[in-house]
Image (cartoon, rainbow, N blue to C red):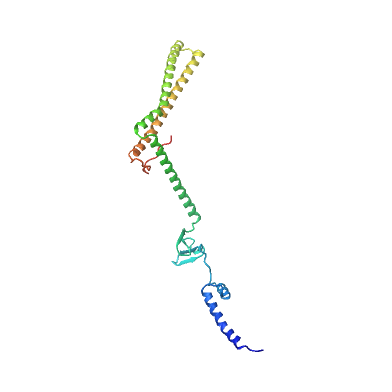
Amino acid sequence: MVCDPVRAASARLRRPLKAVVAVFGCALGLNLCPASTAWAQAKGSVRPISPTANIYTCTDASGRTLTSDRLIAECAGREQRILAPDGSLRTVIGPTLSQEEQVARDARLAREAAARDARQRELRRDRLLLARYPDQDAHDLGREEALSGARIAIRAAEGRAALIAAERKALAAEAEFYVGKPLPTKLAQQIEVNEAATEAQRAMIGSQQAEIDRVNRIFDAELARLRVMWGRPAGASAVPASASPLPRQ
């Protein structure tokens, strides 16, 4: 076998050149050193980070700052911060609650939600009330209209009661002929019917008077509320939180 001095020299020059290219290729991130990359990944020193990955960090009971790529068990009862790969804050997770704490928190949130709903209903009711009664004259007219039905019913019952009383007077005069004697059956029945009719009219008048009192209480409460809102600047929709709610109609 003939040894070619030129080829031998060329081979000796190419070997260091490949080594230099491989080194620079790895430094530049080129896929020129698969063996070295595989070894580094096996050792755990090369770990690609996703741009959407989360970093969890917290301070444990001993004051140590812990960091992980998932929720940290040692900080289950403490606040944990979730960071983006660039270190910016994404969100904060509160401490894990016990069953009793969870029940108490749910009850508190329910109370707060109910209070907000009640407040919103009150505001809507006030806006409707103010639109219906822009001034006291309108409210006074509304009161009279609301009371008119009960007042008419009372006058009608009083008229019927007067007729029944007149009838009762006639029956009493007839009954005087039977003093010390049993009343005739027909007369006794007429007196009984008359007394029932009198009681019915009395009950009717009482119920209508109770209705008048109820309507007046509603309008009195509305008037107190409206006086507060009438005194507010035009366009103001909020009402004082300390004002008492109106009674239900």
**Figure check: 24 above or below 155:** below
Q: Position of residue 165 (x, y in %)?
A: 42, 17
Q: Position of residue 178 (x, y in %)?
A: 46, 11
Residue at 45% of width from left, 47% of height from top?
113
**Figure check: 86 above or below 177:** below
Residue at 46% of width from left, 50% of height from top?
109
Nearer the observer, 171 or 161: 161
**Figure check: 53 above or below 135:** below
Check the image and name the residue furthest to the top. 177
Query: Could you say which quadrant of the image residue 6 lies in?
Result: bottom right
Q: Position of residue 221 (x, y in %)?
A: 37, 35
Residue at 35% of width from left, 39% of height from top?
229
Which quadrant is home to the C terminus?
top left
Nearer the observer, 10 or 126: 10
Nearer the observer, 10 or 202: 10
Q: Position of residue 5 (x, y in %)?
A: 60, 88
Residue at 55% of width from left, 80% of height from top?
19
Q: Does residue 60 appear in this view?
A: no
Q: Does residue 211 appear in this view?
A: yes
Which quadrant is home to the N terminus?
bottom right
74 vs 225, left or right, is right
